[in-house]
Amino acid sequence: QVQVVESGGGLVQTGGSLRLSCAASGSIFSINTMDWFRQRPGDPREFVARITGGGSTNYADSVKGRFTISRDNAKNTGYLQMNSLIPEDTGVYYCAVDGRKMTGRPFTSWGQGTQVTVSS
């Protein structure tokens, strides 16, 4: 069993910043990718950012230049630094972790989400 817990969400004004964390725990041998998704009110869940095991990153066009994804492999934790926030960034942010368990079996685990609200 692999657990993923997001934290760091909250209420912020337009132009403000938040740093989300994504902590994975359990029987983890290795983590490949860590992804952030978000679900804005009334919209389907959408991709935000990805970081690979090698540190390569990619971002949705809507967040490029404003968000930065990173990870601490020693802590099995990923981060999403969000700057210059706008009301359109409001939503529930989810982390998805892909890797391999100690048993050798692959896994993909999602967190429960953390709410980000940007006021105008």
Image: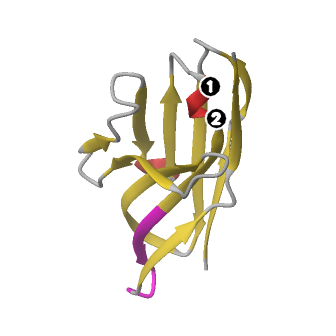
> Closer to the camera, 89 or 114?
89
Q: Above or below — where is 48 with respect to 32? A: above
Residue range highlighted in magenta: 97-104
Task: Name the amino acid type tagged 2.
Answer: Thr
According to the picture, the residue beneath numbered tag 1 turns out to be: 87
Q: Above or below — where is 13 with respect to 18? A: above
**Measuring 57% from the left and 66% from the top, which residue is drawn there?**
110
Furthest residue to the right?
A: 11
Say which quarter of the image contains residue 3: bottom right
Percent coordinates x, y for residue 83 in the rendering: 51, 19
- Asked if the stretch drawn in magenta spans residue 20, the answer is no
CB-based contact (under 8 Å), mark 2 and mark 1: yes
Say which quarter of the image contains residue 85: top right
Whether residue 117 sits left or right of residue 31 in the image: it is: right
Q: Residues within 10 Å of mark 1 (few under 14, many from 20)?
A: some
Furthest residue to the top?
A: 15
Of helix, strand and loop, which mostly describes the magenta segment?
strand
> Closer to the camera, 97 or 49?
49
According to the picture, the residue beneath numbered tag 2 turns out to be: 90
**Measuring 44% from the left and 43% from the top, which residue is drawn there?**
72
Quarter of the image with the C terminus in it: top right
Q: How is the image coloured?
A: secondary structure
Q: Above or below — where is 107 with respect to 34? A: below
Whether residue 107 sits left or right of residue 50 in the image: it is: right
Indicate the secondary structure of the residue bearing disc 1.
Answer: helix
Q: Tell me the distance, in whole angstroms, between the alpha carbons under discs 2 and 1.
A: 6 Å
- Asked if the stretch drawn in magenta spans residue 100, the answer is yes
**Measuring 34% from the left and 48% from the top, which residue is drawn there?**
51
Percent coordinates x, y for residue 50 in the rendering: 36, 49
